[in-house]
Amino acid sequence: MQFAKDIEKEESFLLNTVKETLNFAKNKTTSIEVSVKKTIGISVNIRNSIVENVEFNTDGGLFLTVYNKFSKGSVSSKDFSLNGIKKMFNIAFDISKHSSSDFFSGLPDIKLLCYRTIDLDLFHPWVFNVENAIKLATISEKAAFKFDKRIVNSEGSFFNSHITINVFGNSLGMLGKYTSTRYSIYNCMIARDKHSMQRDFNYSIARNIDDLEKSETLGKKTAARVLSRLGARKIHTMKSPVIFSSEISHMFFSHLVSAISGDNVYQKSTFLIDDLKKKIFPEWLNIEENPHLKKGLGSKPFDSEGVETKNKYIIQNGILQTWLLNSYNSRKLQLSSTGNSGGIHNWLVSSNNISFEELLKKMHQGLLITELMGQGVDIVSGNYSRGAIGFWIQNGKIAYPVHEITISGNLRSMWNNIINISNDVDIRNNIQCGSVLLSEIQVSGN
């Protein structure tokens, strides 16, 4: 109870800090925006039941941007005092006087700002307790060791608990705040047999600690995952059907985020520059952005410029519906901000009424990818090349694990080659998606 009151007190203090900053600048001839972010939390790292690290975190900053006509000055500080605020404003104003004029800079359109309170059920406080945090991490690791004698070592088990307070205001009268919690538990184990040694990991993340996967269950799943990797083989170079498992399929769609971001669009540094309102996915595929999803990991009432977030289709019936725009690049493109300053908010990729097991049967033979490595993706050309680990599928069932392979292609053809998406949706990421079956991709092995 006292902990919740302490958070309320901190919220009130940060809200008053933003108000004071806006009031100080009220009589100035400039436009300003102010944001304050403070994070409070604890992180615990144990390995082989030994506590290696315990961190208490309380970090915050005030970020102020001054728009002097079409010139911009930005500063940040950890000094929330009135004198500190005055110094920040004067420094930002001086910076703006020496900055080049840019017609496209400035505050968002007043009609787009968030002036209403939206409850997204993001705040579920848990009193920070080191002993309980250590216990949660330890149980996960011990369960993995107990699962099988071939589990021989641990790369660490982690537990994190954080509260973040966000307050934003500007000289157009917008003043809003939201507070969120985030809990996560992570476990990475090493398995060995007579012929090889492998590692694998698992994790759980949620807004409410009660929604985390049980530590013991997580540890057992981690053990099962790493054991399934023992005996991994190389495969021959070929073209093959491929499935991106649900745990990594969000990475496959994350490249779309970069390809349609406003900065890349107005700079014409994306291979999708001419594809707005055109079909780039199969016609049955939809991607909806839902920033108001209750307890959503990407849920926000407003973006980093104070623009109200709204539900929208990114992809509808396979057709690209919108760019992802903030105020600056939207003006460059003579469009309106889409409320995506700072990133995306809960992309929900449509899935079909088919299970993961049925998806394997549908592929019959091919490559199931469970881990990707490297960053070999060129958004200008769409060319794609990444290291991969997974399993070879034979007759619709897992035959054996594979490693040391590279997959390559072009995102445009890869997206069009999507055959199906199963209903095993992974909700642990900002992009929520099931496992994705592609008809063909280049696989490089031996």
Image (cartoon, rainbow, N blue to C red):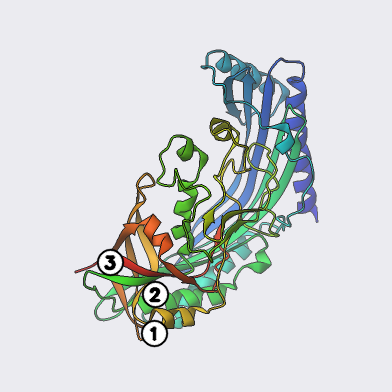
Alpha carbon distance from label 1 to label 3: 19 Å
Quadrant where the C terminus sits is bottom left
In this view, the residue in front, 343 or 46, is: 343
Label 2 SS: helix
In this view, the residue in front, 419 or 180, is: 419
Is residue 135 visible in the rendered image? The answer is yes
Looking at the rendered structure, the kind of residue marked 1 is: Lys
What residue is shown with label 2? 226
Looking at the rendered structure, the kind of residue marked 2 is: Val
Residue 388, relative to residue 327: is it above or below? Answer: below
Label 1 SS: strand
The local crowd at label 3, few if under 14, some if 14 to 19, many if 20 or more residues have their Cα within 10 Å, is: many
Residue found at the very far left of the displayed protein: 446
Give the mark count.
Answer: 3
Decide which of tag 1 and tag 3 comes sooner along the chain: 1
Q: Residue at x 51, y 74 (%)?
A: 422
Question: In which image quadrant can residue 426 be found?
Answer: bottom right
Quadrant where the N terminus sits is bottom right
What residue is shown with label 1? 397
